[in-house]
Image (tube, helix red, strand yellow):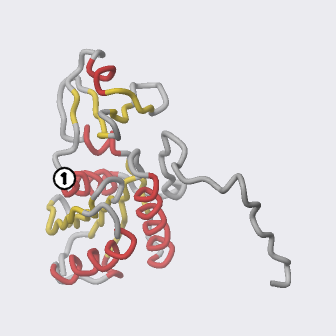
């Protein structure tokens, strides 16, 4: 087991499941798998495999960092729910990290962090404004280099490092960044069935 405090970072906001383990200033394990679905079943086993490979156990974790988006609606919910549940079970802080912050962490000079979206669009956030999704050409017209994450694994590593830099004490639980409403919606034709309180 590593002697330094262990910080876990993970992200499922895109078509992958990615996690990284930080000990002190050193990334000691990273695991990432491309997948368009199945993150909910794969995330916890992947983290456990990574911990075992590093000679660590769940109680050895000191802090959790989780990607809060923007990105895939369901993927963000999976990661944030897992982080909140693990933090509660292990009695450790969980720190929500936006993809924008994770992408920008190791960048120098003026740039615009962006997250790829559907149909040649990108998620972006101009300082002081709310995150939005725009055509890539509109983001490019701002005149700054557009920077994306090199990979899901790189994003998970940055999330772990940012979480390590924050104590997490007194912070609210991680909360998703949703830029647009979910594609799924309740049926407008069939009314929902209301259960009795005794059911």
Residue 189 spot, x, y in % from top left: 72, 55
Q: Quadrant of the C terminus?
A: bottom right
Task: Tell me if residue 12 comes above or below residue 124 in the rendering.
Answer: below
Residue 175 spot, x, y in % from top left: 51, 53
Residue 54 spot, x, y in % from top left: 16, 78
> Residue 167 vs residue 84: left or right?
left
Task: Tell me if residue 40 comes above or below residue 95 in the rendering.
Answer: below
x 33%, y 72%: residue = 43
> Residue 25 vs residue 189: left or right?
left
How many marks on residues? Answer: 1
x 29%, y 53%: residue = 159
Q: Which residue is mark 1?
A: 154
Residue 88 spot, x, y in % from top left: 51, 73
> Residue 7 vs residue 81: left or right?
left
x 25%, y 41%: residue = 103
Q: Residues within 10 Å of mark 1 (few under 14, many from 20)?
A: some
Q: Secondary structure at mark 1?
A: helix
Task: Tell me if residue 181 comes above or below residue 25 in the rendering.
Answer: above
Q: Quadrant of the N terminus?
A: bottom left
Residue in the foreground of this view, choosing between 104 and 179: 179
Residue in the foreground of this view, choosing between 193 and 51: 193
Residue in the foreground of this view, choosing between 96 and 124: 124
């Amino acid at each position: 087991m590593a002697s330094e405090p262990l910080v876990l970072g993970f992200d499922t906001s895109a078509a992958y499941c990615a996690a990284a383990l930080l000990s002190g200033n050193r990334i000691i394990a990273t695991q990432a798998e491309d997948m368009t679905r199945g993150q909910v079943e794969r995330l916890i086993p992947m983290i456990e495999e990574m911990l075992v490979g590093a000679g660590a156990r769940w109680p050895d974790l000191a802090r959790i960092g989780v990607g809060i988006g923007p990105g895939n609606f369901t993927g963000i919910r999976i990661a944030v729910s897992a982080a909140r549940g693990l933090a509660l079970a292990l009695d450790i802080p969980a720190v929500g990290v936006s993809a924008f912050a994770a992408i920008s962490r190791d960048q120098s000079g003026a740039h615009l962090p962006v997250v790829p979206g559907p149909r040649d669009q990108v998620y972006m956030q101009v300082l002081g404004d709310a995150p939005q999704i725009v055509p890539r050409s509109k983001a490019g017209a701002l005149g700054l280099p557009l920077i994306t994450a090199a990979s899901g694994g790189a994003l998970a590593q940055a999330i772990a490092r940012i979480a390590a830099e924050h104590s997490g004490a007194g912070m609210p639980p991680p909360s998703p960044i949703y830029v647009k409403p979910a594609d799924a919606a309740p049926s407008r034709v069939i009314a929902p069935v209301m259960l009795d309180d005794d059911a």
